[in-house]
Amino acid sequence: MPLFDYRCSDCDQTFELLVKISDTPGCPECGGQNMEKQVSRPAPPGQTEALISRARAQAAKEGHFSNYKPSERPRSR
């Protein structure tokens, strides 16, 4: 079941709810049934360059290279 944003017309509250696509939930705040599905912003990609570089710096500081590709890891002698 996906997460959807809803706005209650009765109490003007906005909620993010986990519901089936075909269901229209009641308002968890006031119990009203006048819920409008809102347009949600798409989530940004999870693997940004800044996130990857911070994870790699932390891994190098801790002495392991699990966040690196095999071609980027230092070679053992």
Image (spheres, rainbow, N blue to C red):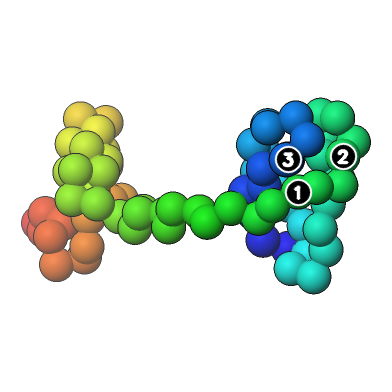
Q: CA distance from mark 3 to mark 1?
A: 5 Å
The answer for how far apart the CA atoms under marks 2 and 3 are is: 7 Å
The residue located at (86%, 47%) in the rendering is: 33
Residue in front for this viewpoint, 39 or 64? 39
Q: Can you give x and y, in whole percent of width and height, for residue 69 in the image?
A: 22, 62
- Residues under numbered marks 2 and 1 in contact, where contact means CB atoms less than 8 Å apart: yes
Query: Which of the two labelled residues, at mark 3 and mark 1, occupies the earlier sequence position?
Result: 3
Question: Residue at left 24%, top 52%?
Answer: 48
Q: Nearer the viewer, residue 2 or 31?
A: 31
Q: Secondary structure at mark 2?
A: loop
Q: Earlier in the sequence, mark 2 or mark 3?
A: 3
Tag 2 residue: 32
Q: Which amino acid, by three-letter code, is at mark 3? A: Cys
Q: Residues within 10 Å of mark 3 (few under 14, many from 20)?
A: many
Q: Residue furthest front?
A: 10
The image shows residue 32 at horizontal and vertical percentages of 87, 39
Q: Which mark is residue 35?
A: 1
Q: Which residue is mark 3?
A: 8
Residue occupying the far bottom of the picture: 22
The answer to whether mark 3 and mark 1 are in CB contact below 8 A is yes
Label 3: element kind: strand
* Mark 2 Cα shell of 10 Å, populated few (<14), some (14-19), many (≥20): some
Amino acid identity at mark 1 = Met
**Three-letter amino acid code at the position of disc 2:** Gly
Name the element at disc 1.
Answer: strand
3D distance between C-alphas at marks 2 and 1: 7 Å
The residue drawn where x is 73% and y is 63% is 1
Image quarter for residue 53?
top left
